Image: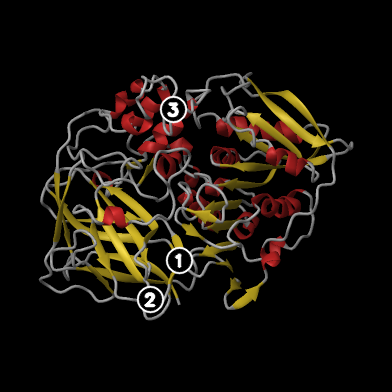
């Protein structure tokens, strides 16, 4: 069930169970930690009762313990196994002093907290960092600041660049997540449960789902009774500019000299951060140890380990005890325990389709063959009833293009994909047939496969397209078409046309001009089995996971005007739209 090349390994060899807890613990609440500017942050400190010096794990959070009663589970789990666990509210949140501004102070405050922890009487001087999502992103910021006593960290399901894989994906604005995580969640201490997506503080009966239709985006949060200054700032900075650059760890990998263990899921909203975190550290890190000893674990999950996600059950081995995996890493680097982790291949990934874990020596895999599958049709690829085909063979000279209309008032609804965290649409691998019946979705499908095809690694679509508008979006999905008819999304991506050349210097389209657009589908690992078919869906909306591009080219988020776009996708010999698949022989 578990593979390394062609060798079979047992489950416990890949994921040994954690040793049992051996420590009674004490909890020191509201421990003050002074920052360099005089602001005091507060932490709860979990530590073994037995006197001595222990390695320390620092976890920094913006989240309320009232809403997250399980938040302290990791603190108890690790402290009972011989660690001090410092669980700290970030600046301006809950007990900590200062102004809450997401992401802004986490480099300096993380550095100061790590060095404070190393200097305490119960510390052995070695500090690690732990936590997921925002709690993982803050680790990257602290590590780039190079605190001397930070020895290793485990960012789980974490962004590496707030602009590139949190706020946007290729310039497409992550509407439901940004709004739900931002003004709704962070500006409210209490979330009412009066309905599936009803919010406290807004007008009676006005749901999250309905608010997301509001234009312009800049006034949306007022409908919910919110006034988050940072959210206005996000909208006013749609380009990758100096507002975002300090929040990008990917520009600082060469400053990080400690080993990093990234963990995440193929369907997580921050899957790009998990993958880029590993590839960046393994190629750019400041020290040889950080480059060669960093690790990645990526499973068939969303925002955390599970066996089932979306419409699929990935089998009894899919779920992993993330704490146990992290413990081996921390034991080696913080306790000097020779548990063998340094001699194991650094990448552990789950190959869907076959539903198997596999270890690899690198990512992307060195043996990858990047192969193109080309789009074909007679000009009628719209919907799954159309004539769109995928083939390894290039198209002919005179192949007719496909056309569709994208109406922002009737967008393609989000159905599965890489989303998370209370947004009003289901995430993960979900049957796409309901949206594939629409006339504004182009569907290209291969023949039935006569042999298994493994696709593991980064995926992209190269689209030769035109629009009659000066700006618009194109979305691509890689789909596994099952023999029973289920069309399960395995990877997805978006490109906002104005960002086709640069995320920092937008450039509007020339209406009617055919343009090359590269859509990054981030990455996946799936075996398309014998009897299945490979499919690519192309459309121009994915709402409310991404905001509706109004097609007008006006400044982002400032206008309520929309325009219907006429879209054309070409697939001729000279304009051969295709998907690039990382095929593993």
The residue at the point 48 percent across, 25 percent down is 192
Q: Position of residue 182 (x, y in %)?
A: 44, 30
Query: How many other residues sit within 10 Å of disc 1, few (<14), some (14-19) or many (≥20)?
Result: many
Query: How many other residues sit within 10 Å of disc 2, few (<14), some (14-19) or many (≥20)?
Result: some
User: What element does badge 1 sit on?
Assistant: strand
Whether residue 440 is situated above or below residue 529 in the rendered picture: above
Total labels: the figure holds: 3
Q: Position of residue 27 (x, y in %)?
A: 78, 30
Q: Is residue 386 left or right of residue 4?
A: left
Q: Is residue 343 left or right of residue 52?
A: left
**Residue highlighted by disc 1:** 526
Q: Can you tell which mark lies on residue 531?
A: 2
Distance, label 1 to label 3, CA atoms, is: 35 Å
Which of 179 and 262 lies nearest the eye of the viewer?
Answer: 179
Q: Is residue 359 left or right of residue 382?
A: right
Distance, label 2 to label 1, CA atoms, is: 14 Å
User: What element does badge 2 sit on?
Assistant: loop
Q: How is the image coloured?
A: secondary structure
């Amino acid at each position: 069930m578990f593979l390394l090349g062609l060798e079979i390994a047992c489950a416990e060899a890949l994921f040994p169970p954690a040793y049992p807890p051996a420590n009674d613990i004490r909890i020191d609440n509201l421990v003050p930690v002074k920052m360099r500017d005089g602001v005091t942050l507060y932490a709860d400190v979990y530590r073994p009762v037995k006197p001595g010096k222990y390695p320390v794990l620092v976890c920094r959070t913006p989240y309320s313990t009232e809403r997250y009663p399980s938040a302290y589970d990791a603190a108890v789990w690790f402290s009972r196994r011989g660690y001090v666990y410092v669980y700290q509210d970030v600046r301006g949140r809950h007990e900590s002093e200062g102004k809450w501004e997401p992401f802004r102070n986490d480099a300096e405050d993380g550095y100061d907290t790590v060095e404070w922890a190393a200097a305490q009487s119960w510390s052995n001087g070695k500090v690690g960092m732990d936590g997921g999502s925002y709690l993982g992103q803050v680790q990257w910021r602290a590590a780039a600041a190079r605190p001397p006593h930070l020895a290793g960290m485990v960012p789980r399901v974490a962004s590496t660049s707030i602009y590139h894989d949190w706020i946007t994906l290729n310039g497409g604005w992550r509407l439901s997540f940004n709004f739900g995580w931002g003004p709704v969640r962070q500006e409210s201490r209490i979330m009412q449960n009066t309905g599936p997506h009803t919010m406290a503080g807004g007008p009676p009966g006005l749901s999250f789902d309905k608010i997301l239709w509001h234009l312009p985006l800049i006034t949306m949060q007022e409908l919910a009774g919110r006034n988050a200054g940072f959210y206005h700032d996000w909208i006013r900075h749609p380009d990758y500019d100096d507002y975002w650059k300090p929040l990008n760890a990917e520009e600082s990998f060469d400053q990080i000299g400690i080993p990093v263990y990234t963990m995440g899921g193929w369907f997580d909203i921050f899957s790009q951060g998990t993958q880029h975190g590993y590839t960046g550290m393994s190629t750019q890190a400041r020290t040889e140890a950080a480059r060669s000893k960093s690790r990645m674990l990526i499973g068939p999950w969303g925002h955390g380990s599970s066996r089932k996600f979306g419409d699929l059950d990935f089998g009894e081995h899919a779920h992993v005890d993330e704490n146990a995996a992290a413990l081996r890493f921390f034991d080696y680097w913080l306790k000097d325990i020779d548990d063998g982790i340094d001699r194991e291949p650094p990448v552990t990934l789950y190959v869907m389709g076959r539903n198997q874990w596999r270890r690899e020596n690198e990512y992307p895999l060195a043996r990858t063959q990047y192969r193109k599958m080309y789009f074909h049709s007679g000009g009628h690829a719209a919907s799954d009833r159309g004539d769109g085909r995928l083939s390894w063979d290039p198209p002919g000279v005179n192949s007719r293009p496909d056309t569709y209309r994208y109406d922002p008032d009737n967008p393609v609804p989000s159905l599965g994909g890489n989303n998370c965290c209370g947004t009003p649409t289901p995430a993960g691998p979900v049957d796409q047939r309901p949206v594939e019946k629409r006339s504004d979705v182009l569907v290209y499908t291969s023949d039935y496969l006569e042999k298994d095809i493994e696709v593991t690694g980064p995926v992209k679509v190269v689209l030769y397209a035109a629009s009659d508008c000066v700006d618009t979006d194109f979305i691509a999905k890689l789909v596994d078409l099952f023999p029973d008819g289920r069309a399960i999304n395995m990877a997805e991506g978006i490109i906002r046309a104005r960002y086709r050349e640069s995320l920092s210097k937008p450039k509007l389209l020339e209406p009617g001009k055919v343009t090359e657009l590269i859509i990054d589908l981030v990455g996946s690992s799936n075996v398309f089995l014998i009897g299945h078919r490979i499919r690519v869906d192309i459309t121009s909306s994915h709402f409310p996971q991404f905001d509706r591009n109004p097609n007008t080219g006006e400044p982002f988020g400032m206008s309520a005007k929309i325009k219907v776009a006429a879209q054309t996708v070409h697939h001729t010999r000279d304009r051969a739209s295709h998907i690039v698949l990382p095929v593993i022989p």
